[in-house]
Image: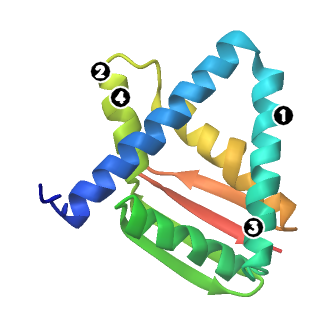
């Protein structure tokens, strides 16, 4: 049998649904079974590992940090309106429409207990800020209705 080649949009949707479903499912399980301290510890370890990987790939300033995630958000997950502005000491990553947020909200409409605030705070506070801190950067985020604007600085 010939295996069909999926379109870019179909591949991105499958990747988003797998990634987001796994993250929400794992987070919920850990919170129910082990509590917030265990989730905090896991998030710290994941962020440390991601930061080590980024360092090994030469991510050593805010623009490279922002570009790393812009490429993934746009190409892997299919987010729209993704842009990076800035320079070596400060950068801004803007995502007008976050495809992962939209997928999480679709899961929420099907009964998964997730809100926009929970998802976005988990993304920023549970992941992005921790990775940035491991790389020696500060990070703040401004949430929009369908995405966010992340400022990364030395």
- Answer above or below: position of 77 versus 84: above
Residue 6 location in percent, x, y?
19, 60
The residue identified by callout 4 is 107
Residue 146 location in percent, x, y?
38, 49
Farthest residue to the bottom: give it: 87
- Answer above or below: position of 143 versus 74: above
First along the sequence among labels 1 and 3: 1
- Which label number is shown at residue 110? 2
Rendered residue at 12%/59% (across/down): 2
First along the sequence among labels 2 and 3: 3
Q: Secondary structure at mark 3?
A: helix
Circles 2 and 3: CB distance less than 8 Å?
A: no
Of circles 2 and 3, the one toward us is: 3
Q: Is residue 89 left or right of residue 110?
A: right
- Which label number is shown at residue 41? 1
Circles 4 and 2: CB distance less than 8 Å?
A: yes
The residue identified by callout 3 is 53
Q: Quadrant of the C terminus?
A: bottom right
| Mark 3 neighbour density, 10 Å: few (under 14) some (14–19) many (20 or more) | few
Q: Secondary structure at mark 4?
A: helix
């Amino acid at each position: 049998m010939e295996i069909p080649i999926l379109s870019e949009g179909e591949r991105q949707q499958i990747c988003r649904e797998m990634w987001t479903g796994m993250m929400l499912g794992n987070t919920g399980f850990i919170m129910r079974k082990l509590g917030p301290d265990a989730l905090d510890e896991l998030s710290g370890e994941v962020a440390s590992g991601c930061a080590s990987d980024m360092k090994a790939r030469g991510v050593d300033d805010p623009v490279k940090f922002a570009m790393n995630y812009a490429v993934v958000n746009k190409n892997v997950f299919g987010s729209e309106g993704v842009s990076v502005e800035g320079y070596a000491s400060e950068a801004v990553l803007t995502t007008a429409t976050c495809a992962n947020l939209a997928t999480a909200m679709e899961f929420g409409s099907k009964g998964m207990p997730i809100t926009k605030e929970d998802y976005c705070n988990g993304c920023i506070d549970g992941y992005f800020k921790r990775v940035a801190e491991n790389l020696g950067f500060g990070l703040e985020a401004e949430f929009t209705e369908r995405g966010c604007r992340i400022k990364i600085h030395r």
